[in-house]
Image: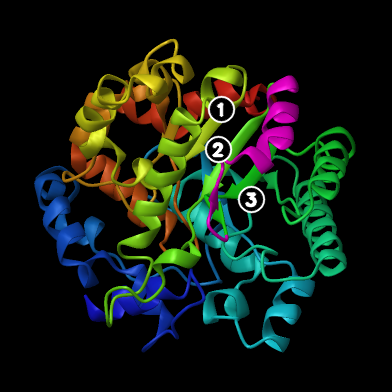
Amino acid sequence: MNDLISSAAAEDGSAPLAGNFSSLCCPCDNTVSRRGFLSGMAALGAGALLPGCATSQGGGMNAPTVLGNRDRIDTHHHFFVPSLVAEMVSRKIVEPPALNWTLAKTLDDMDRAGTATSILSVTTPQVSFADRDTAKRLARESNEYAAKLGGDHKGRFGSFAMLPMGNTDDALKEIEYSLDVLKADGIGLLTSYGDKWLGHPSFAPIMDELNRRKAILYTHPTVANCCRGLIPDTPPTVVEFGTDTTRTIVNVVFSGTAARCPDLRFIFSHAGGSLPFLTERLQKMPVLNPSLAARVPNGVMHELQRFYYDTAWTANGYVLPSLLHLVPKEQVLFGSDYPYRTSEDNIKGLIAYGFSERDLKTITRDNAVRLMPRWRG
């Protein structure tokens, strides 16, 4: 468990990885996940549930598998453009997953899980650490790199483009270039920037433009300035990532952004963080504070239930029942969080949960196709 938590810390860039990163591949290192998988052992067999870790060698899309379909679409899959990695190295904020990432390893991970297409995105800190010119350059290079991967490997890669959020004009120009020229599938933002969540008034022009375009907005958690190092020896990935996702959802809803942008399609990572467990409290907020009612004219549940949520780090019997009580399976997307978890781990968790073959296909492919019809074929 300690190895898993230490490995997860690398996603935030706030704590070094301990031990070998390959330990993150195996669900046996995570007590919670392992217990969640036990219910599926009779159907899948213990050997199928606790495999060796994926390697960069792979067997291609014809490799043997116990995972069934090979047409899955992963909407939470990270990549690392070399220029961004080099900048993070120079600032001493890079972690092993970024240094160890390769295209060969990515394709191998996808093949092992039966993933036909991964929608690539950049994880925290994106370019939030950089000055304006550097942020513009790195965002553009990253978005072009993802587009090139998609062109070079037809059908395997889409992308959620990164924006230089430090300057609104720069962000709007990158939206135009990424969606119109590069044909990105959507935009990928962090849940917060400094101490501003996505419903903040300064982000309104960006949200309005994405709504005008009826775009997809994928979000990835980070840790806000307010909340670094609150619990000793506990990386932000363990508590703060889920909490920051919840904060930005609450901010988007009660700032009025969600109601103002009905055509903006939100995807929230990790099953919405702690959102499913706070739903009752959120429904009461307009009652306790009537001034909020005008910002949610369609009701709190209307907004929460139109959002999409992915399964990264949540493909288990502890989270899924609550999420599926909040939204129907048609609002749930397969997300692996590769390379911080393997895609195979996530699919095996979904299978062990007991989804039918039809429901599994709904979550791992059909919902993504409805959002992004170009992947239908």
Q: Residue at x 41, y 62 (%)?
A: 341
Residue range highlighted in magenta? 194-213
Q: Residue at x 60, y 66 (%)?
A: 125
> In this orientation, which residue lies closer to the viewer: 370 or 176?
176
Residue at mark 3: 120
Q: Amino acid at mark 3?
A: Leu
User: How many numbered dots are placed on residues in this image?
Assistant: 3
Magenta span includes 304 = no
Q: Main secondary structure of the magenta part?
A: helix
Q: Are marks 1 and 2 in contact (CB under 8 Å)?
A: yes
Tell me where residue 331 sits by quadrant: top left
Residue at mark 1: 257
Quadrant of the frame with the C terminus? top right
x, y percentage for residue 54?
Answer: 44, 68
x, y percentage for residue 91?
Answer: 68, 86
Element assignment for label 3: strand
Q: Residues within 10 Å of mark 3 (few under 14, many from 20)?
A: many
Quadrant of the frame with the N terminus? bottom left
Q: CA distance from mark 3 to mark 1?
A: 26 Å
x, y percentage for residue 311?
Answer: 37, 43
Residue at mark 2: 199
Which callout, 1 or 2, points at the residue further toward the start of the chain? Answer: 2
Q: Amino acid at mark 2?
A: Gly
Q: Residues within 10 Å of mark 2 (few under 14, many from 20)?
A: many
Tell me where residue 215 sits by quadrant: top right
Which callout, 2 or 3, points at the residue further toward the start of the chain? Answer: 3
Q: CA distance from mark 2 to mark 3?
A: 24 Å
Which callout, 3 or 1, points at the residue further toward the start of the chain? Answer: 3
The correct choice, above or below, for 376 with respect to 50 in the image is above
Element assignment for label 2: loop
